[in-house]
Each structure stands twice: as structure tokens, then as C-alpha cells.
Image (cartoon, rainbow, N blue to C red):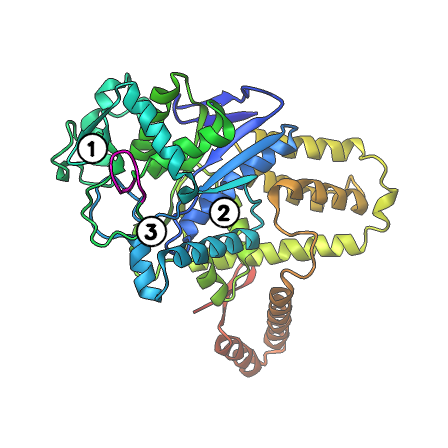
Amino acid sequence: MKLYNTISRAIEIFNPIDENLVKIYTCGPTVYNYAHLGNLRTYIHEDILEKTLRYVGYPVKRVMNITDVGHLESDADDGEDKMLKGAKRENKTVWEIAQHYTDAFFTDIEKLNIKKADITARATDYIDDYIEFIKGLEKKGFTYIANGNVYFDITKVENYTKLSGMDIEQLRTASREDVSVDVHKKNPQDFVLWFTKSKFENQAMKWDSPWGVGYPGWHIECSVISLKNLGEQMDIHCGGVDHIPVHHTNEIAQTESYTGKPWVKYWWHSEFLIDQDGKMSKSKGEFLTLSLVEKKGFNPLAYRYYVLNSHYRKQLAFSFDSLDSAENAYIKLKNRVKNIKENAGDLQEVKELSPASKSYREEFKACLEDDLNTANAITVLFNVLKADDIQNAEKIKLVEDFEQVLSLGLMKDDETEIHDDLAGYVEEMIQKRQDAKKNKDYQLADAIRAELLEKGIALEDTRQGVNWKRIN
């Protein structure tokens, strides 16, 4: 199996530290609002990574953090406490906000057939552990105190920028924060381990510590939660590419300073989902959520299908037209599997796959082992469905096998029932319109097009046939 390793900037053969257990850490959501589609794209690809590892035979233990302290978004310590903002907006306590959006996140990933991590850890459950971690760094001489806050001194670390490959000036430019605003830092890239003096007024979440009442810095939770649940070394650390220059760079600095050991063997990062204005984020007004996608009539698994037809290391441009095309293809795929299943006979009679079926399975596995090439894996799936060298029962057996990783709900008849009805209705109307045109009844053909348009369905006549899509 081959994976791209961010720290080496190369595709490498995957050799886990211990073949008996692959340890993975995935950066989880900050639960002051809903996850947007860009976040969910990363979680889908991480799901594929974990399921691929299991598919090829590795036992896996995956840990994900839940950031339930809303201001832990950057080291700038300015702007607003997002958890407190959410609490005021919805007339709830910060703890209620955290629980509400944690539940919403788990609902979203369930709808997308994303497996929950083996361990999901809330940041606020590890306060005592953060304090012990900071004390350990303090004892080793990696910290200093200024203006009541505890800082990590990056000059004490060799090769601080080894993950990003940037020099310090580039890193400062790439940072999401204006690091110059904190005049108490010795170096612009130093970062806070514990705040006691904050620019936030009426800070909602504070805890006692040896340095005073305050709260932990942004980067510390992932280091501590992974150490507590996976030990001092792990195989894969996942996240979005935006975490590379600052968050993951600082995680490495503090963790390896604390343990004195190399921490992560493979750094895995997913590229951005972009819209017409660039990178998707929560600061653009009505940001795109899975709930919004559902309100527009789309099946969440159509979004998963859309994502899997792209590579995780390439930016993916999102539009509802593209999602509409993906859902039409997904519905056709579901219907094709359904038809084959209905004509497959007794699956129990398939005691062993034929050589042809085994060859398709190996091809599918090879696609996934090639740095998680899900688009090619889906092509193999289509080749199986149209193959004339294997029986229907074996085709369904292969679909079941592939679904261990793809998780598109292809073996379930109920998930696209509404969409199947819509697709069937539209296809029937298209056929009636075609018949009307053949009979030169253009008035009826135009009436059918108008009726579909009233229902939000637009037709497009092409040389290859009639395409249709939903319009908002």
C-alpha cells in the first residue's frame, strides 16, 4: 500500500510501526456550529483511509478529538469566543452549544456512512492532562511566561518547519493569524500553551492551573489526546492542508519536545473543497452544510459519491450543478445494482469467487492501495456491473465486498427511494416527450418540458440524448 507523506513530500510504501495495530489520529470538529461540506469532505476521505487499511488486512485504532472550547481556533487570542457567540445567538450555555453541535456532527457523519472513530475525545475532558504536559515542557526548558501566559519557545526546537518546508517568513505569511499582535512573544511564531490573560471579555470556560485561572492554547489538545490514547508514537496523523503550516507544525514541536521521540510516521492531508469564491469556510454567511444539501432535495450519499470521484490530494470545486450530475449518476448506479440483485438468484450458492471475479477484486484493491485512488476504484465497480464474464450473483458479492470501503449504501433499497421515484418519473416523462416529437406533436412535447420545469426539472437536448437536472 502506498500513501503520500506530507513530511517527506513523496508517495511512500506504507510500513506501520506495528503491523498488529495501525494507530491513526484525526483532527475533529470545533463544535460551535455545523460542519461545512469542506470539513465533511476531509472526514469522508479519512473514512476511506481507515476502511482501506482494514480492507487490506490491518487492525486499526483511530482517535478523534472534539474541540468543545470555542476560542481554540488560533493563537491570536483576538476576535470573539465562538462558543460564547453561539450561546448568545441560541440562548444556550456554552456547554449546551458544544453538546448540540457535537450531536449534529455525529448525525452528519452517520448520514454519510462515515465510521465513528474508535475513541472520540472531548478537549474539555483533558484539562488536567494539559497541565501536566505543560509542566513537563516547563521542566525541560521549552517554555517561558510573559504577561501571565505560558508560551512555547520555538527557537529551542531543531527543524521547526520540517512539516511545511517553509522558512519562518513564509510560515508567518501562511498563518491564519497576525502573529505580530502579541507583543509579549519572544519570537513571532511562539505559541501559547496556557492563557491567564486574554483579550476575550467574560470568558466562559476557565480552569485553575499552576499559572493562574485560564484555559489551554489552541494546539495542545491534539498532542495530549493522542499521547493519552495512542502512546508516544503513531502511524498516521490526518487533517486538512490548512493545518500544515501552523497547527500541525506546533503539534510536532511540542510533542517531540515532550517525549524526545519522533512522533508521527506518516502525515496525511486532504485538500480543500472550494466554491466559486475559493476555499469553503464558515465565515461566508450561509455556509454549505449537509442539512442545506438535504433541504435542496439531495441524498447525503450522493455527496459522498461526488467526493469519492475526486482524489483527496486535489482541490474539488463544488457547485449544485455538479452535485446534481453526481446524484443522477449515483441513482443510476443504485438502480443498476438493484436490478442485478433482483436477478442474481441465491447468493448462498456462491461458495468461492471465480478467477475473473478475483481479478476484479485485486484491481479494486490495487486502486485503493495506490494512494487511495477512489475514482479508479469506482471505475472498477462499473466494470464489474457491466462485465459479461461473471454471473450476477458474483457481481453482487463483489459489490458487497467493495462496499466495505466505498460505503455508498448500494445494497440498501430504501436510501434513495424518493430519488428513485423522481428519476423514474422524469425518465418516463422524457420518453413521452420523445414519443410526442416523433409523432410531430410539438405542442405536447413543449407542454411536457414546461410541466417538468414547473417541478424544478430542466431538460437539455444533446446529441447523446436528453439530460436532466434539478434547478433551484
Q: Tell us which disc is closer to us: 1 or 2.
A: 1
**Under tag 2, what secondary structure?**
helix
Identify the residue at horizontal 36%, vertical 34% (top origin): 130
Residue that badge 3 annotates: 281
Q: Toward which corner of the image does residue 57 lie, by quadrant?
A: top right
On the rendered structure, is 74 left or right of 228? left
Return the x and y of residue 221 as percentages of the image width and height: 38, 36
Query: Identity of the amino acid at label 3?
Result: Ser
The amino acid marked with disc number 1 is: Arg
**Highlighted magenta segment, given as a residue range:** 207-215
Label 2 to label 3, Cα distance in Å?
Answer: 17 Å
Do the residues under discs 1 and 2 have CB atoms within 8 angstroms? no
- Image quadrant holding the C terminus, namely bottom left
Left or right: residue 214 compared with residue 233: left
Which residue is label 1 attached to?
A: 172
Amino acid under label 2? Val
